[in-house]
Image: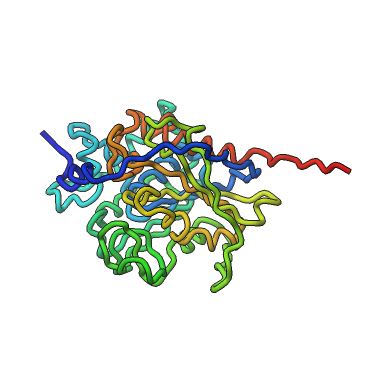
């Protein structure tokens, strides 16, 4: 019988368990323009960004993936448990002694899901911009897997595909922060200093006319904490709280929104504010009127998710890959909240 790799099982003994928060405020209504919604993520967050972009392709105009495989990767072959596929074929198939995922098979499955109404009509993907990044030294999600991600989007006829695979980087969020790990690192917490801010490059690939973040200037905006229990129960795997970066200008007038999904080992439980404050999105977002939503999952034993990964193998539900998936549906509801008109302030004379 197949079992998860030993490092996955061992991590379950050490992983912190999320404690539900109390009194977290509601996500603010900002009147964002959902027609310009983009998503991205690293590792399991890359898989989640792609799942969301397929399930809600009518809403998403662009998707960025840093070290992630093709959509529904863990679902094939059906003879294997999805968890096994997720941590072998969908990560480092050569090390596991198995074949890599097959984008042609997975695209056919995606077409079936669309025909069954489990995801949006696939015409939406043809309007999406796609940004892919695969580090040459990445030993966690290898280049052979990311090549199939590129092939998936070629089959889907995405509007544009930017594929960066010539950087001597290991596995992780690529930054220009000296405090982060060495560029070639393949170890938690998966923030690698390669002297470049990949989040800014990603946003520039997904939107027209992105201005560079001004160097050495304070970031004009604020990070807010919000209650995720309004959108999904603990059984979904979502943490009690999420975060969002709101540029100062977006408090006064409508902006667009980008959803950034953290990777495994990158939850607030594990790294505190490292991802939502220092991953590199906020600087570019502030200069370009983009709200950044940072939803959070929690390391848990039930459902079994000790590393704090987004669900790309089915720990939250059997329909994790579609609109009915509790994590995707929750994020869609968060976006709907951000799109609500901001309250009108009445001035009393």
User: Residue at point 26% right, 59% down?
Assistant: 187
Q: Position of residue 156 (x, y in %)?
A: 40, 44
User: Residue at point 75% right, 40% down?
Assistant: 344
What colour scheme was applied to this rendering of the protein? Answer: rainbow
**Quadrant (top left/top right/bottom left/bottom right) for the C terminus:** top right
In the image, 264 versus 166, the foreground residue is 264
Compared to residue 337, the image places residue 193 above or below, namely: below
Q: Is residue 203 left or right of residue 307?
A: right
Q: Quadrant of residue 217?
A: bottom right
In the image, 169 versus 7, the foreground residue is 7
Whether residue 128 is visible here, answered yes or no, is no
Q: Residue furthest right?
A: 349
Compared to residue 259, the image places residue 115 above or below, namely: above
In the image, 245 versus 322, the foreground residue is 245
Q: How many marks?
A: 0
Q: Position of residue 50 (x, y in %)?
A: 40, 45
User: Residue at point 13% right, 36% down?
Assistant: 2
Q: Position of residue 114 (x, y in %)?
A: 42, 31
Q: Quadrant of residue 82?
A: top left
**Quadrant (top left/top right/bottom left/bottom right) for the N terminus:** top left
Q: Quadrant of residue 213?
A: bottom right
Q: Is residue 318 left or right of residue 205?
A: left
Q: Is residue 169 left or right of residue 30?
A: left
Q: Is residue 7 left or right of residue 74?
A: left
User: Residue at point 37% right, 68% down?
Assistant: 179
Q: Position of residue 244 (x, y in %)?
A: 53, 49
Whether residue 186 is visible here, answered yes or no, is yes
């Amino acid at each position: 019988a197949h079992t998860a790799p030993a490092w996955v099982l061992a991590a379950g003994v050490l992983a912190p368990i999320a404690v539900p928060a109390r009194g977290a405020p509601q996500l603010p209504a900002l009147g964002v323009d959902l027609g310009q919604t983009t998503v991205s993520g690293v590792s399991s967050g890359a898989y989640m960004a792609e799942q969301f972009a397929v399930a809600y392709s009518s809403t998403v105009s662009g998707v960025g993936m840093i070290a992630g495989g093709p959509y529904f990767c863990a679902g094939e072959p059906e003879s294997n448990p999805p968890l096994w596929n997720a941590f072998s074929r969908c990560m480092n198939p050569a090390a596991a002694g198995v074949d890599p995922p097959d984008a042609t098979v997975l695209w056919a499955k995606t077409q079936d899901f669309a025909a069954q109404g489990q995801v949006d009509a696939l015409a939406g993907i043809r309007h999406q911009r796609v940004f892919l990044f695969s580090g040459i030294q990445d030993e966690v999600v290898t280049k052979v897997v990311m090549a199939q991600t590129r092939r998936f989007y070629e089959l889907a006829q995405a509007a544009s595909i930017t594929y960066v695979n010539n950087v001597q980087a290991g596995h992780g969020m690529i930054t220009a922060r000296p405090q982060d790990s060495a560029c070639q690192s393949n170890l938690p917490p998966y923030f690698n200093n390669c002297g470049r801010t990949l989040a800014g490059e990603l946003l520039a690939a997904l939107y027209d006319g992105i201005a560079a973040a001004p160097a050495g200037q304070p970031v004009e905006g604020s990070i807010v904490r919000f209650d995720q229990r309004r959108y999904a129960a603990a059984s979904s795997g979502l943490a009690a709280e999420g975060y969002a970066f709101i540029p100062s200008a977006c408090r006064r007038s409508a902006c667009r929104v980008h959803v950034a999904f953290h990777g495994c080992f990158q939850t607030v439980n594990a790294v505190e504010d490292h991802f939502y404050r220092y991953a590199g999105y906020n600087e570019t977002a502030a200069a370009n009127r983009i709200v950044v939503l940072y939803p959070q999952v929690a390391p848990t034993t039930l459902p079994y998710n000790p590393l704090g990964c987004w669900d790309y193998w089915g720990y939250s539900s059997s329909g994790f890959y579609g609109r009915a998936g509790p994590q995707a549906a929750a994020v869609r509801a968060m976006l709907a909240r951000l799109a609500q008109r901001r309250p009108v302030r009445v001035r009393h004379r």
